Image (tube, rainbow, N blue to C red):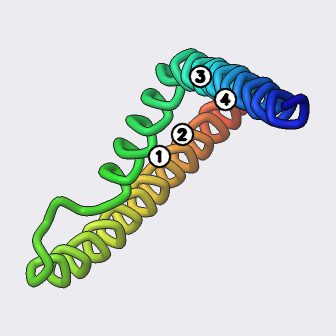
Amino acid sequence: SSPGISKVIMKLVFGVYMMITVVVLINLLIAMMSNTYQRIEARSDIEWKFGRAKLIRNMIRTSPTPSPLILLMGVWIDWYREWRKSQASRQKVEIMTVAAFNRKASISEAAAKAA
């Protein structure tokens, strides 16, 4: 009868050991998931702000014009840039002309005073 009781006791101890092991492993899994959740929760505000900034940057980079019209808009934008450059160069020429005229006028005034 001794080997039969030993076999029952061994199965009982092994069953208790397995139950304790399962409970400990489940607790460990819960703790790890809780820790991961807390880390993600701590960074969620930063992640949200980063995602929002990325979305805004992409919206600024892309044109709101629909596909067929974007070709015309591209041509118009290029023409407008060239026109602005020509206007700026004309202004520079006008400013240089006025500056040269003022220089000539001051030189002629100085020559008139010296004479």
Is 94 placed left or right of 60 in the picture?
right
Q: Which residue carries the number 2 mark?
A: 102
For the C terminus, give its image quadrant.
top right
Quadrant of residue 14 in the image? top right
**Which residue is located at x 61 percent, y 34 percent?**
106
Q: Amino acid at mark 3?
A: Ile
Q: At x 9% / y 78%, what residue is drawn?
A: 69
User: Mark 4 or mark 1, which is nearer to you?
Assistant: 4
> Is 108 placed above or below 88 here?
above
* Crowding near the residue tagged with mark 4, few <14, some 14–19, many ≥20 C-alpha atoms within 10 Å: few
Q: What numbered label is drawn on residue 30?
A: 3
Marks 3 and 2, how far apart in space?
84 Å
Residue shown at 17%/77% (left/top)?
70
Query: What is the distance, in whole Å, between disc 3 and disc 4 at their CAs?
Result: 12 Å
Q: CA distance from mark 2 to mark 1?
A: 6 Å
Percent across and percent down for residue 47 are 51, 31
Select label 3 or label 4 by which is in front.
4
Residue 112 tag number? none
Q: Which residue is mark 4?
A: 22
**Image location of residue 18, percent across then percent down:** 72, 31
Along the viewing direction, whichever of 103 and 13 lies nearer the viewer: 13
Amino acid at the residue labelled 4: Val
Nearer the N terminus, badge 3 or badge 2?
3
Separation (CA) of disc 4 from disc 2: 96 Å
Under circle 1, the secondary element is helix
Q: Say which label, 4 or 2, has the lower sequence index.
A: 4
Q: Secondary structure at mark 3?
A: helix
Q: Amino acid at mark 1?
A: Val
